[in-house]
Amino acid sequence: MKIMIVDDSTIVRKVIERYLAITQVEIVAHASNGVEAIEMFKQHMPDIVTLDITMPEMDGIEALSKMLEIKPDAKIIMISALSSKDTVVKAINLGASGYLIKPVAAHQLTDKINKILEAKSERRRFKDLLRRRS
Amino acid sequence: MKEEDLKIYSDGVVNYFKQFAESKVVLNAPALKSDNFTFFDYSAIIGISGAVKGGIYITVSTAMLDDLIVAMGMGAPDDSLRRDMIGEVANNISGNAGDKFSGEFKISVPIVVTGKDHNIQLPVKIPAYAVPFEWKGHKSQFVVGTE
């Protein structure tokens, strides 16, 4: 599974990268704002994205909508310091697969990633089963 | 600004530094920001809009930022990492306050100011409160001015 990390902070991107080292994902791209994120998304078509909200040029909410238009089954995990209910609800309603509030602990992110990986693997098993039965 | 509102931001500072298990943050008594307020080497400002309007800024020393960068496992600190670090601290403190206020709560990207004798004036007509705090012996302050 391919993952892209989007955050305007170099430090946060590196911390997330470190957290992901123990998961079964391949980091294919980084971006520091929404505009760059969309370009990188089109180029790499990642399965999972960790996406900050407050960023220059284009915020994470707008980038979330655009990414899901391009690849509706992409799993987008919002990682933001913004904890207001309005923002969380807006992101989830737009199709975000999760919302983690900064500062994020390693286990919070890896748990979320592992659940996405398990669900994907479960769907694959189910499809295989259906194929064998038909 | 009410006292409980100020506590929301103070809790944000405590919450941010919780991730560094080896050293807790110590908050001191808040006071109205005075004219002889001490700015340290780096300051980061966040504008707040929506249901709450105003801003928050944090000012810290180079030494504190360097310790934070090392604590984050980022290796040798430099000016770019220090700017990034202080911006992220300010972003966390202000952003985390959002769930305590009803209605829309928006924050800007951080603006970082450095250099000798820099100064910041929040664009609000109400008094701003300064909260001194210490982490690993480094003195620092954050200022909140909201209406």
Image (cartoon, rainbow, N blue to C red):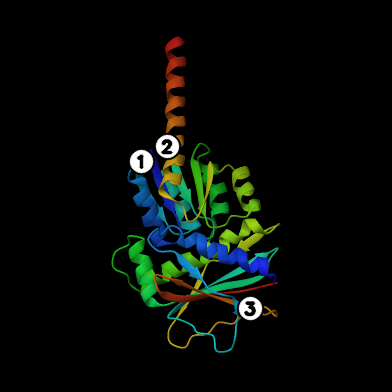
| Residue at the spot of label 2 | A114
Coordinates of residue B78 in the picture (x, y in percent): 33, 72
In the image, what residue type sits under mark 3? Ala
Q: Residue at x 62, y 59 (%)?
A: B98
Coordinates of residue A51 in the picture (x, y in percent): 49, 51
- Callout 1 environment at 10 Å: few (<14), some (14 to 19), or many (20+)? some
In the image, what residue type sits under mark 1? Thr
Of all chains, the one bearing label 3 is: B
Q: Residue at x 47, y 30 (%)?
A: A119
Q: Residue furthest left?
A: B76
SS at mark 3 in the image:
loop
Coordinates of residue A16 in the picture (x, y in percent): 39, 52
Q: Residue furthest top?
A: A133
Of all chains, the one bearing label 1 is: A
| Residue at the spot of label 3 | B128
Residue A69 in view, yes or no: yes
The answer to the question of whether label 2 and label 1 lie on touching residues, with beta carbons closer than 8 A, is yes
Observer-side mark, 3 or 1, equals 3
- Callout 3 environment at 10 Å: few (<14), some (14 to 19), or many (20+)? many
Q: Residue at x 51, y 67 (%)?
A: B90
Query: Tag on residue A56?
Result: none
* Number of marks in picture: 3
Residue A47 in view, yes or no: no
In the image, what residue type sits under mark 2? Asn
| Residue at the spot of label 1 | A23
Coordinates of residue A17 in the picture (x, y in percent): 36, 51
Quarter assignment of residue B123: bottom right
